[in-house]
Amino acid sequence: MDSPFLYKLAVVAPLVALLIYLINFSNILARFVSGSTLKKYRKLLNVYLVTISIVLLNYSFLVDNLNHYKLAFVDFSRISPSSPISIPVLINNYTGYDFHGYGFKSRDRRNLRIPPTLEAQLMSLCEDIEIQSHLEVTPKTVFEQDLHSIRQLISTMREEYPMVKYCFLGEKNPVSSEEEEQDEHEYTEEDDLIEHENFIPLTEDEIITRKWWVFGGSSVWLAKYKVHLMVSRVIYSRVGVKSKPTISLGYVQLFDRNWNELQNYRLNVNNNGRRLSLNFPMILKVPIYARNRYMGPEDPRILVRNFKNSQGEDDQEPIVVFNMVNKDIEDKRGMHVFKPFSDEDSNFLLLRVANSEVKGVEKNWVPFFDSVDQQTHIGFVYNLDPLLVVKCSLSDGICNKIFVTEEIDNNTVGSMRGGTNLVEIPQKFFPKNMRIDTLDRQYWLGFPRSHNDECGCVSTAYRPHFLIFSKNMNNDFFQIEYVSSLMDFNIDVLPWNTEANNICDGGISVLIPNSIAYWDFLTEDQANENEAKLCGDTACIKDDYMGITFSEADSNVIVLHVRGFYKNILKILANNIDYIDEGDDRTRISEKNMFLNECAVGDAKGYCQAIGNTTNPFP
C-alpha cells in the first residue's frame, strides 16, 4: 500500500471517528429532533458517513495507484533488458504538449515554389507548409547536485591532475571582475599568500554559493553496460561571476535505468583489449592550458559510438565533445573530443578543419554519428544556415568539409545553432507501406537552440527547436527536412536570477537543450491489418520514449521524458517531396534550408508575446 494513501487514511480516520462520536454520543442532533426521529436520523447519518468515507478512500487509493494499473497493459517481454525504458519512465505523469513546425511534406503541394525573395510572401508560405504536432511530456526532474561532494572529489585529485589547483586559488582573497580583466598574468599560489586589508575569509558554504556552479548535463544510454552516463560542466569562478569562470571541468556520473545515481561505482571497460577500471563519479582529466581565466572544457556534449573493437566484437563507448581555449591554436577557442574509455595516450583530440584558417572561436558544432563510418569518423553540423557539414577523423582530429551549400566567413553565426547531439532514426522501424525514401536516405533528429532578441518581457530568450536532418546516400547531399517553432515542453523556465519571482526578472530567459539522453521503442506483434501501418522490418511500434536533458538559466541539470515523437516523424516525412528539382542542387538546398529556418525563427513573435504576458510567479 502506497505511503500517500496511508497518510490520507491517517487524516481521514480520526475525522470520521469524531463525526461518529458527535452523531451518536453528543446532544447536537437532539437539539433539532427527538425521540424515534432522532434514532432514525442517527442511523441514516451513520450510513451516509461510512459510505462516503469508503467511496472517498477507494477513489484516493485508485488515483494514488493508477500508475501501477498502467503496468498491467505493458508487455514486459517486449522490452529488452538493455533498454533505457524503465518503470518510472512508463508510469510517469504525462500531459499533452502541442507544437508546430515547417516541412515540405505533402502531395497536394507539388506546385509550391520558394519565392526568389524570402521576405516576399513569407508568412503565407510558412502557413502553407506548417505541420501541427502533439506529444506527451512529463514534468521536469531536477538532478540535485551536491557541490560540496564535487568540490571534495576535485580536492583529492591535486596530485594526479594538478590543474585542479586552479579550483582553489583565490578562494580567500577578494578580486573584482574588473581587476581580473586588467590583470593578465597567471594567478599562482604566491598570489594566494598576499594578505588583503580588512578582508573577512569566506566560509566553505559561502565559497560554494558564490563561486561554484554545475549545469549543462549531457547524457547517453550505454546499452552494453545498462547505465546512463552524464557529463556536466562544473565551474569555479575566482571573481564569483558565472559568466567569467576561472576554470571549467567535466564531471561524469552514472545512473541506473531508473535514474538513480550510482555512487562510488566501478565500471570495467574494454580499452583495445585491455581492461580499464573507472570509478564514478569522476572528473575528466582533460589536458588544460594554464592561463588566468576561461580554462578547461566548456559546453560538453556526449554521444555514444557503436563500433567493432580490436577483438572484432560489437562495442560501445561515450564520446565527449566540447570547446576549449588551446595554446596549440594560438590561444584560440577550438573544438575537442575526449574518449573517457580510452587511455591517456589516445583519449584527447583537437579538431581542425583542413585547408581552413582557425577561427578565433569554434563552438556550437552539432555532433552526430553516421552508421556507415562511425568506426573511424564523427560528423558535425558546423553551421545550420547556411548549411555546412564536416567529418572528422577519430584518429588525428582532421576534419573535412563534406557538404557546403555556400562558403561562410569567420563571423557567420546563424540564429539557430548548437543544442543536442543528433540521433539517427533507425530505418528498420519505418513502416513498409508509407512513402518514405528509406532506401536512399538517412535521417537524424535533434534539438538545436535559437537566440531570440527582445522576446516578450526579456531582452534575450534561448529556446530549443525540433529538427529532422537527412542525407541522400546517392550523392551525400545533406538537407534540413523539418524544423519546429520555439519549444519549451511545458517547462516553467527558471528566471536568470534564480532568486526572482518570475521570468521577466533578470532580462534573460535560458532553456538550453543539452542531449538526447535516450530514444527507444515499445514494440508489439502485428495484431491486425490496421496496425501494420506502423510495422517495420522487425516489429510494430506501440510507443516511443525519449529522454532529453536541459539546463535552465545556466544553473541546473534537468531531464524530462517525451512520448510520441515516432508518430510525429512519420507524419512529417510521409509523402515527403524532394524539392531539389531545378537549377543547382546545392543552391536549391540552401534556399530550402534558409526558408525553413526563417519560418521557424520568424515564428518566435507569437511565442514571445506569451512570455510578455507572463505575470505568474514561479512555484
Image (tube, rainbow, N blue to C red):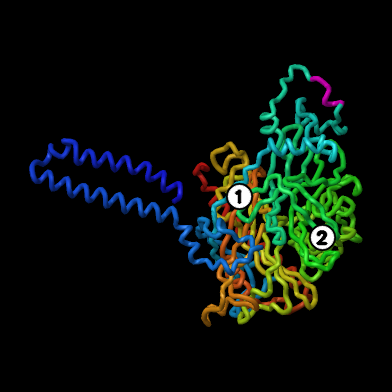
How many marks on residues? Answer: 2
Residue sitting nearer the eye, 281 or 393: 281
Disc 2 residue crowd, few under 14, some 14–19, many 20+, Cα 10 Å: some
**Residue 35 drawn at (x, y percent):** 8, 42
Q: Which comes before the other along the chain, label 2 or label 1? A: 2
Above or below, comparing residue 437 to residue 395 in the picture: below
Residue type at tag 1 = Cys
Identified at 80% across, 54% down, the residue is 341
**Residue 299 drawn at (x, y percent):** 74, 49
**Residue 247 drawn at (x, y percent):** 79, 39
**Main secondary structure found in the magenta portion:** helix
Asked if the stretch drawn in magenta spans residue 109, the answer is: no
Q: CA distance from mark 2 to mark 1?
A: 27 Å
Label 1 sits on a secondary structure element that is strand
Residue type at tag 2 = Ile
Please, which residue is most extreme toward the left here?
Answer: 35
The residue that label 1 is drawn on is 455
Q: Is residue 612 visible?
A: yes
Identified at 75% across, 37% down, the residue is 236
Above or below, comparing residue 12 to residue 77 in the picture: above
Above or below, comparing residue 546 to residue 616 in the picture: below
Q: Quadrant of residue 100?
A: bottom right
Identified at 68% across, 55% down, the residue is 228
Span shown in magenta: 190-195
Identified at 54% across, 55% down, the residue is 138
The residue that label 2 is drawn on is 408
Q: Is residue 609 visible?
A: no
Residue sitting nearer the eye, 456 or 300: 300
